[in-house]
Structures are given as C-alpha cells and as structure tokens.
Image (cartoon, rainbow, N blue to C red):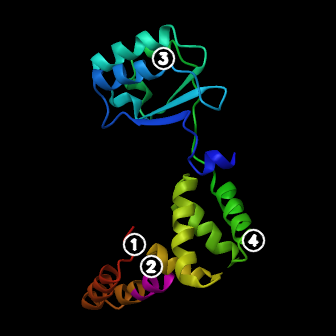
Amino acid sequence: MENLENENVLDIAEIDAASNNGVENIRSMREEVVFSPTKSKYRVYIVDEVHMLSVGAFNAFLKILEEPPPHVVFILATTEIHKLPATIISRCQRFDFYRISPENISQRIKYICEKENIEIDNESAHLISVCADGAMRDALSILDQCVNICHGKIDVSFTKKILGISGTEYLSEIYNNIKQGNSKECIKIIDKMYSESKSMI
C-alpha cells in the first residue's frame, strides 16, 4: 500500500482518454499489455474519461477487451456511460458510484482533523461537506484551504469566509432596507457582497 500511495508502482498506468483518444494511443497500449507485471499480480490500466475515445480507438480497444492477457486489468472510468458503445459495455463489469452524503463527508472531515490535531466545530464540518456537493476530494480541498490559514482552529465564521458564504447578517440588512423602501442601500449591500466575492445564490 505504501508504494501505491507514493506512486512508485510501475504496474499501474493511468491514461487520460480526453487527450489520448486516438487509435495510435490504443495501439501503443496494446503493445504494452503483453508484458508481464514487474512486482504486482496484475498490470492495471486506468482509462479516465473513456467516453472521449474516438470511434477508431474504441474499435481498437475492443480487440484487447475480447481477449485480454490474463495478467491485465482494465478500469474504465466515465461520467457519461451512455456514450460508450454497447460492444464495450457488454464486456465490462459495471460499478456505479454515487455522491457521498454530507453526513459521511462531515464525519470524515472531523476524523481527519482529530488525527491532525486541528480543532473544528460541527457547523464548519457540515458547511464544508454541503459545499463539496458529494465529492470527498472537493471537501478535502476546502479543508486544506482552511487548515493553511486557520493555524489549528477552524470555526464557522472562518469557514464562511473561506467558502464565500454571505451569512444571515447581509440578508437581514437587505430585508430591513426593503421594508423601509431604501433601494439605494440595498444596491450598496449587494455591491459590497459582490466586491467581497460572497455567494449571491
């Protein structure tokens, strides 16, 4: 596991199909797969954004999938499964991944903070998890931004500032000025929110 984390395993290759989507790229891979793995049990090829392959590339890839070497595993990753040819899908075992719930993301954030001796309140963890929109990687990216500036303690006001969330104080000001018919002041508040990069949603 340590080698995997340090990206030192030569038997695992990741291919970005968005920029390597031609027939020649698949032919190059087809020439490589005949070689046995160096240390691992399998040679693993992760083809990201596989739906971006050209028609010719899919046809070339199909020849490998029909009779793959026993020591090779292909992982085809896509967010647009409907763009894959039926001939490709029929030769794969399909796994569908879904968004992670805010509750699970929040728990993971608090667990990481505990291990790293970082204080974080429940509301901050919840805000980060909601803004991550089901993606743990995005949540950790936001957490990393907070950690780099907060110096070991993350509170909700600080988290809102990092996320660009306006908070209720601006809404209260706008509401009070609407009641008083003070449209100019409302525009000033909105302009201030915009200049501070606060979310308008």
CB-based contact (under 8 Å), mark 1 and mark 2: yes
Taking depth in this image into account, of 31 and 77 the one nearest to the observer is 31
Taking depth in this image into account, of 180 and 162 the one nearest to the observer is 162
Residue occupied by mark 1: 199
Mark number displayed over residue 114: 4
Q: Tell me: 36 left or right of 63.
A: right
Dot 2: element: loop
Residue sitting at x 64%, y 32%: 39
Find the distance from the CA under tag 1 to the CA under tag 2: 6 Å
Q: Quadrant of residue 84?
A: top left
Taking depth in this image into account, of 135 and 195 the one nearest to the observer is 135
Q: Tell me: 189 left or right of 137.
A: left
Mark number displayed over residue 89: 3
Q: Residues within 10 Å of mark 4 (few under 14, many from 20)?
A: few
Q: Residue furthest left?
A: 184
Dot 3: element: helix
Find the distance from the CA under tag 3 to the CA under tag 1: 41 Å
Dot 1: element: loop
Q: Quadrant of residue 182?
A: bottom left
**Place of residue 92 in the rendered image (x, y in percent of width and height, measured from the top left):** 54, 18
Residue sitting at x 39%, y 77%: 198
Residue occupied by mark 2: 166
Q: Residues within 10 Å of mark 3 (few under 14, many from 20)?
A: few
Q: Is residue 120 visible?
A: no
